[in-house]
Amino acid sequence: MNATSPHNFPASVSLRHVLETDLGMVFFYDNIVVVEAYEGVTISYITGFSILIKGLQKLGTRPWVYIANRINSYSVNPNDYKYLEKIPTLKGLVIITPDEIGKKNAALEANFFNKPFTVVDDLASAYKCAQSFLAGDTST
């Protein structure tokens, strides 16, 4: 495990920055952003805009993948995915949720996002999907 990473990514993946916000924790790796929202919050374009701006400043022009590590129960507005789609450096979205209800919700959310989108059970699978998206393989 990478000693600086709480996500057990390969040692070659550097944790660059951690942002603690009212909505949750945001972990910036080289080309991966892991978001762990707090229990009961609502994430929307309005509530998450300042986090998005700070994140884009950290990432610069690097291509990246958003991983939503749903360790807590919270709400999202899937209509707001249209704003994420407009970010040219965002290559895809991976949602981690091990339970069936979470998977069904995420499958519905996928209908609102027109970039690569997948749902997985764990961080290791999310990392593999992120690498595929960054390599341009959208079949994951």
Image (cartoon, rainbow, N blue to C red):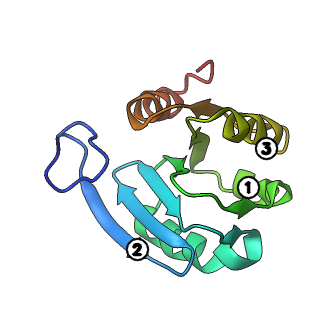
The answer to the question of whether label 3 and label 2 lie on touching residues, with beta carbons closer than 8 A, is no
In percent of width and height, residue 20 lies at 42, 76
Q: From the viewer's side, name the closer residue of 107 and 138.
A: 107
* Residue type, label 1: Lys
38 in relation to 85, above or below: below
Residue positioned 59% across, 70% down in the render: 52
Residue positioned 49% across, 79% down in the render: 21
In percent of width and height, residue 71 lies at 51, 52
Assess disc 1: are there few (<14), some (14-19) or many (≥20) residues with their C-alpha within 10 Å of its C-alpha.
Answer: few
* Residue type, label 3: Glu
Disc 2: which residue: 19
Mark identifier at residue 86: 1
- Mark 3 → mark 2, Cα distance in angstroms: 25 Å
Residue positioned 61% across, 42% down in the render: 93
Mark identifier at residue 109: 3
| Secondary-structure class at tag 3 | helix
- Mark 1 → mark 3, Cα distance in angstroms: 17 Å
